[in-house]
Image (spheres, rainbow, N blue to C red):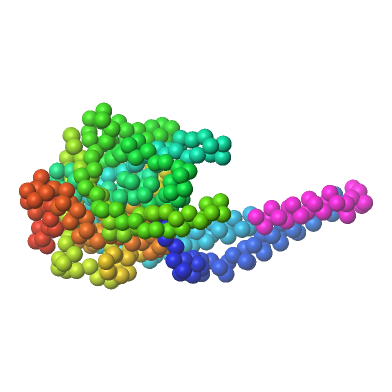
């Protein structure tokens, strides 16, 4: 998931560590002091055998090394303590949300897919030789129709458009993206996705590869929305285009072949009751992509509250890059947004689901290839009974 650090990032990080800041310096002083005393004691023992050795450069170097080692150990322990405190603070903040949102989480895994995109590009080196490279993006997608339509982010399906460094190299003529090389794979939650060496295993995946028995196709993509930036490459200002992280960062995929497709209920932007500040919300996905998995595509949950509702939905859900494209659900189990990017540790942004539903309607056409009431926004009545009871 792309990260956009705001001017408040440093202050936010400082606030997270507030409960451990008092312990940090004390811990450093205690550990470093203890190590220094031990080191001095060691030097006296050495000096007992040879008084002249007490002031030799070798002894001084040894003492300094021991002191520096103690300081490094103290800093490592302080960082570990800060991380532990931050984790406990996060658990405490969301402890009251776990109980009401737990029923919502039940059954959602059947609608979640691990998504992987791989593509080739070429870069010209200093010897004017083109070198082949390959990049990979991992994320999440979720089912919205019984016919196998998935919603996710465009930056997971066409990631090069959102990479400012690569786009700058392309504009400079020093790189080329081989779009025809793009490979897409989607694994249902719980399915084997990695082999024993941790390499992606396409066996149980839906794929856009011609030989795949279960197909994955791009059904619709939002129009590209580029902005012009200037990047510094080797001291040269290079103007280039890069895709914005906004409402057009959406794609609808379609699964073809064997499988049972379980859609999540989606809510229109004008449905009642509306999403409001401090409403509890939940997301499910694969935070670290393939790196956070053993062998199977096991998703994880994260909770938070709504901070602000506008053209986008801002929440306190802690997210990572692999959460991109995942659903954000309210306490009734309705999808209200698509997880897209983060500003800082506890500030994530989701696109409203209405934009994805409009794109889905374009993908299915006027006559539609989906069941009635699914291609559009379901009514509030259609959302009962709640997801947990389905």
Where is 248 relative to 369, above or below? below
Residue pictured at 37% horizontal, 35% vertical = 200
Say if residue 294 shows up in the picture.
no
Say if residue 27 shows up in the picture.
yes
Expressed as whole percent of the image width and height from the top left, the position of residue 67 reads 73, 56
Give the residue at the far right of this rendering.
Answer: 52
Expressed as whole percent of the image width and height from the top left, the position of residue 275 reads 22, 68
> In the image shown, does 347 or 243 lie closer to the viewer?
243
Image quadrant where residue 283 sits: bottom left
Give the residue at the far top of this rendering.
Answer: 211
Left or right side of 219 for 194:
right
Task: Report the magenta stretch's main SS.
Answer: helix
Magenta span contains residue 63: yes
Image quadrant where residue 137 sits: top left
> In the image shown, does 307 or 95 lie closer to the viewer?
307
Left or right side of 308 for 376:
left
Expressed as whole percent of the image width and height from the top left, the position of residue 34 reads 71, 59
Expressed as whole percent of the image width and height from the top left, the position of residue 26 reads 63, 66
Where is 56 relative to 89, above or below? above
- Magenta segment boundaries in residue numbering: 49-72
Residue pictured at 33% horizontal, 65% vertical = 315
Left or right side of 263 for 181:
right
């Amino acid at each position: 998931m792309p990260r956009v650090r705001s001017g408040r990032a440093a202050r936010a990080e400082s606030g997270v560590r507030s409960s451990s800041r008092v312990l940090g310096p004390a811990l450093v002083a205690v550990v470093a002091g203890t190590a220094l005393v031990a080191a001095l004691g060691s030097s006296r023992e050495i000096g007992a055998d040879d008084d002249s050795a007490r002031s030799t450069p070798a002894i001084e170097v040894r003492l300094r090394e021991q002191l520096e080692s103690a300081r490094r150990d103290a800093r490592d322990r302080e960082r570990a303590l800060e991380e532990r405190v931050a984790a406990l603070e996060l658990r405490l903040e969301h402890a009251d949300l776990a109980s009401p949102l737990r029923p919502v989480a039940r059954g959602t895994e059947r609608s979640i897919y691990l998504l992987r995109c791989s593509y080739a590009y070429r870069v010209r080196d200093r010897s004017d030789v083109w070198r082949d490279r390959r990049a990979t993006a991992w994320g999440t997608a979720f089912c919205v129709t019984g016919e196998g339509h998935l919603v996710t982010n465009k930056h997971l399906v066409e990631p090069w458009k959102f990479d400012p460094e690569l786009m700058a190299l392309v504009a400079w003529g020093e790189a080329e993206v081989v779009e025809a090389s793009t490979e897409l794979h989607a694994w249902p939650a719980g399915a084997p996705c990695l082999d024993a060496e941790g390499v992606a295993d396409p066996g149980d995946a839906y794929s856009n590869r011609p030989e795949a028995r279960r197909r994955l196709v791009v059904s619709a993509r939002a129009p590209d929305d580029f902005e012009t930036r200037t990047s510094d490459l080797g001291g040269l200002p290079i103007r280039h285009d890069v895709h914005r992280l906004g409402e057009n960062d959406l794609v609808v995929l379609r699964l073809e072949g064997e499988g049972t497709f379980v859609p999540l209920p989606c809510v229109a932007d004008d449905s009642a009751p509306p999403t409001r500040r401090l409403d509890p919300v939940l997301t499910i996905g694969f935070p670290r992509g393939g790196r956070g998995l053993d062998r199977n595509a096991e998703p994880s949950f994260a909770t938070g509250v709504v901070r602000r509702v506008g053209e986008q939905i801002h929440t306190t859900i802690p997210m990572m890059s692999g959460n991109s494209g995942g659903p954000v659900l309210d306490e009734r189990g309705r999808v209200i947004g698509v997880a897209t990017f983060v500003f800082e540790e506890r500030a994530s942004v989701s696109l409203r689901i209405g934009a994805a539903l409009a794109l889905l309607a374009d993908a299915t056409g006027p006559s539609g290839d989906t069941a009635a009431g699914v291609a559009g926004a379901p009514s509030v009545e259609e959302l009962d009974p709640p997801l947990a009871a389905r």
